[in-house]
Amino acid sequence: MPQNNIHLGNFNYIPDAGLYEESSPQFFDPREKHKHGVLLIHGFSASTNEFQHLTGLLKDKHIPYYIPMLTGFGIDTTEKLRHISTKDWLRDVINAYRLLQSVCDTVSIVAHSMGCTLALYLAQNFPVEKLILSAPYIMPKSNQQLLKRLLLTPGFSQLISLCRSSIKKNSKNDLKKISESKRFVYTKVPIQSVKTLWALTDKIDLKKLHYQKLAILNGKNDGTIEIELVLSRFDSAGHSYQLITFENSGHNILEDKEFLIATEAVAQILAN
């Protein structure tokens, strides 16, 4: 507990999120609880719009869902990302999970990319019915490991931030495709947000997950993650999972060429 808040010692403190259970958002619905609800967690530099093709199917199948907007994303500036911490994003999803849990007996999670890291953190600490991970970004690629170590090392981190305060995520060709697809995504982000993303991946312990079913979606043309390394981590932790590969998709499976097939596959898993 923070030293200057020692008087709050009677409250239940969650250090990872800088959150007190008793001060979390509260929601009450006097009607009977839904049997099942779905928490959707979007990826890095994106927004709730990332699930634009999935939500219609969930409505058709009468599956309640909630999509929190992660702090620093989905707004008209990236300035908040210059001061973002892992606590911000963990607080977002813990509060979202609890709100959904207040009206649903069981909660499933569908997450994309960085959202998968947040989903796994939740599955370490709360019961999850079905855990569906789309292009799970749970570690940097091999050629990014050195930069991660430097960014997470005091001194080096400050030096790198002084030399390069922001990182471009997309090429000019990518920008045209993004515009045509109507995806809400930042194409340039503060380096602090990348540092926070990589710090977040270190909070995952795959041996501590609580779920009933695990499914992983993979785009064959994904250049953002190294799926073999990702799967090897799940294998090493002793998990069994359903792997669904989309031959003509890249990283953004739920919005790519095969989004109709991908979103239907997700909806079917949730409905069964």
Image (cartoon, rainbow, N blue to C red):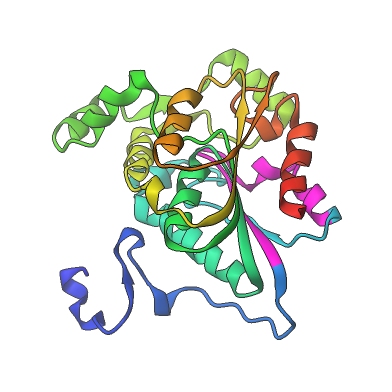
Horizontal and vertical percent position of residue 140: 38, 29
Q: Total of numbered circles in the picture?
A: 0
| Residue 69, position as x, y percentages in the image | 56, 53
- On the image, which quarter does residue 233 sit in? top left
Percent x, y of residue 173: 61, 13
Does 49 sit left or right of 113 as displayed? right
Query: Front-most of 150 and 145?
Result: 145
Residue at 44% of width from left, 42% of height from top? 238
Tell which residue pokes out farthest to the top in this image: 173
Q: Is residue 22 above or below residue 177?
A: below
Compared to 17, does 237 lie above or below?
A: above
Q: Residue at x 45, y 38 (%)?
A: 234
* The N terminus sits in image quarter: bottom left
Above or below residue 63? Residue 260 is: above
Residue 128 visible to the viewer = yes
- Towards the viewer: 155 or 13: 13
Q: Residue at x 57, y 15 (%)?
A: 172
Q: Can I make out residue 226 in this image? A: no
* Closest to the observer, 112 or 36: 36
As drawn, is 163 to the left or to the right of 36?
left
Residue 192 quadrant: top left
- Image check: 13 left or right of 53? left
Kindly identify the residue that appears in the image at 55 percent across and 43 percent down: 76
* Part of the protein shown in magenta: 36-59
Horizontal side, residue 218 vs residue 149: left or right: right
Q: Position of residue 43 (x, y in %)?
A: 54, 40
